[in-house]
Image (spheres, rainbow, N blue to C red):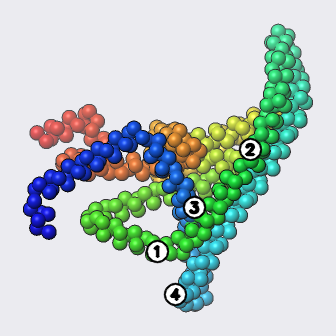
């Protein structure tokens, strides 16, 4: 051992070897990026059931905690029942299976609600489009009787574009739907692989949730073994902060979107809107996406209602604007609080970057991920400023305040 410590040539040789190896890896990574990406894709494809299982376990963990701590154990305590080690294990598995059942029921209900409504709406739009155009022409003619020139211009636009749009629906949309069905049928193997991964993921999530305390303890053991006690404590603190921010945002946003979907269903029922179930589900689901979600859901819904009744479409737009103002100013802040701590600019930036990289999932996950990275970055900035004996408040760095601070230092 002393030979390795006291031999400078050996140390220099190891350093040179590691530098050369790092340079080769860097060169390979720059000029053979496609091979690395393909390798990562293969590894992710193999580990996809485990990834699904971890995600499902993370989403079901709050449900499991609620069932155990708020329902089962208080009920047993009220009846003076003592719970042993075996009983706790049975209670844990019972609550896990109940949580999995609730998840499957929610997904099944959403699919059985959305898919038939989408199919029926598409068929009704195509079948009733000629009648809709006739009604629109009559409505425009009655509204513009006092202005013959404008009336003739509008009717000319209807005659010109109505035929094109009808041909587009019959010649393009329907064949594309048929092609999509054929593609779906030809991709049965991919669908089976997806469901296989989901089933394995659910099984993995059951084992993760059953022994979550053990997995957490083993992770801490590994962390303290690899890092110093000081760095391990910092990493655990940051992980707890990440969990609070990420989990709080996801759970809060789901509860918020559920309430918005219910309110939309009640409101469209009062206003006697068509497609109220489909519209409410779309508005509730897209509301999960911050900032852009309400608009992504309201636009297609307004178009669907427009094909039935233009005036109801206008009422729906007004209702959605009022509903989103209520959500953005009252309901959302009450449920989410300051779970992200991001400014409006950072929220928009995180949604755009996340959506550009990972699609719809990225638009949803981008906000909490950005919030975590943003908070960790500013924690580092504040600690660095504290080390330099400088103020950590933003107001202190405004021009006037900074001049006063320099004067005090002098």
Q: Is residue 243 left or right of residue 304?
A: left
Q: Do the residues labelled 3 and 1 touch (CB within 8 Å)?
A: no
In the structure shown, which secondary structural element does the residue marked by tag 1 occupy? helix
**Which numbered disc, 2 or 3, marks the residue closer to the eye?**
2
Q: Earlier in the sequence, mark 3 or mark 1?
A: 3
Report how far apart the C-alphas of labels 2 and 3 lie in the structure.
24 Å
Labels 1 & 2 near each other (Cβ < 8 A): no
Q: Earlier in the sequence, mark 1 or mark 2?
A: 2
* Percent of width and height locating residue 109: 74, 59
How many other residues sit within 10 Å of disc 4, few (<14), some (14-19) or many (≥20)?
Answer: few
Residue located beneath label 1 in the image: 213
Residue 98 placement (x, y as % from top left): 65, 72
How crowded is the residue under tag 3: few (<14 C-alpha within 10 Å), some, or many (20+)? Answer: many
Contact between marks 1 and 4 (CB within 8 A): the answer is no
**Mark 2 highlights which residue?**
183
Q: Is residue 275 above or below residue 219?
A: above
Q: How crowded is mark 1: few (under 14 residues within 10 Å), some or many (20 or more)?
A: few
Going from N to C along the chain, the mark reached first, 3 or 4, is 3
| Secondary-structure class at tag 2 | helix
In this rendering, the label closer to the viewer, 1 or 2: 2
* SS state under label 3: helix
Mark-to-mark CA distance, 1 and 4: 14 Å
In this rendered view, identify the residue nearer to me: 2 or 384.
Answer: 2
């Amino acid at each position: 051992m002393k030979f390795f410590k006291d031999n400078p040539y050996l140390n220099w040789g190891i350093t040179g070897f590691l530098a050369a190896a790092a340079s080769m890896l860097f060169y390979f990574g720059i000029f053979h990026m496609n091979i690395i990406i393909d390798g990562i894709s293969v590894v992710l494809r193999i580990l996809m059931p485990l990834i699904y299982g971890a995600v499902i376990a993370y989403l079901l963990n709050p449900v499991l905690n609620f069932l155990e701590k708020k329902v089962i154990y208080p009920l047993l305590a009220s009846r003076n029942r003592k719970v042993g080690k075996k009983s706790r294990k049975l209670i844990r598995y019972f609550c896990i299976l109940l949580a999995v059942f609730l998840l499957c029921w929610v997904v099944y209900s959403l699919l059985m609600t959305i898919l038939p409504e989408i199919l029926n709406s598409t068929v009704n739009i195509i079948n009733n489009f000629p009648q809709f155009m006739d009604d629109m022409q009559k409505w425009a003619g009655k509204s513009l009787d006092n202005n013959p020139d404008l009336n003739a211009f509008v009717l000319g636009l209807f005659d010109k574009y109505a035929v094109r749009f009808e041909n587009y629906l019959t010649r393009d949309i329907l064949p594309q739907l048929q092609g999509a069905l054929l593609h779906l049928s030809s991709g049965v193997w991919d669908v089976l692989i997806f469901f296989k991964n989901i089933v394995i993921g659910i099984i993995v999530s059951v084992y993760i949730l059953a022994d979550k305390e053990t997995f957490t303890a083993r992770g801490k053991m590994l962390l303290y073994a690899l890092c110093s006690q000081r760095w391990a404590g910092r990493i655990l603190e940051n992980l707890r902060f990440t969990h609070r921010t990420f989990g709080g945002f996801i759970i809060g946003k789901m509860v918020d979107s559920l309430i918005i979907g219910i309110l939309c269903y009640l409101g469209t029922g009062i206003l006697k809107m068509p497609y109220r179930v489909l519209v409410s589900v779309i508005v509730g689901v897209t509301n999960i996406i911050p900032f852009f979600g309400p608009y992504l859901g309201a636009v297609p819904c307004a178009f669907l209602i427009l094909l039935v009744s233009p005036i109801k479409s206008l009422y729906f737009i007004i209702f959605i604007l009022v509903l989103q103002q209520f959500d953005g100013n009252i309901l959302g802040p009450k449920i989410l609080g300051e779970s992200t701590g991001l400014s409006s600019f950072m929220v928009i930036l995180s949604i755009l970057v996340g959506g550009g990289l990972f699609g719809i999932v990225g638009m949803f996950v981008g906000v909490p991920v950005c919030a975590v990275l943003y908070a960790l970055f500013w924690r580092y900035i504040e600690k660095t400023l504290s080390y330099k004996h400088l103020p950590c408040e933003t107001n202190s760095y405004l021009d006037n305040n900074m001049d006063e601070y320099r004067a005090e230092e002098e």
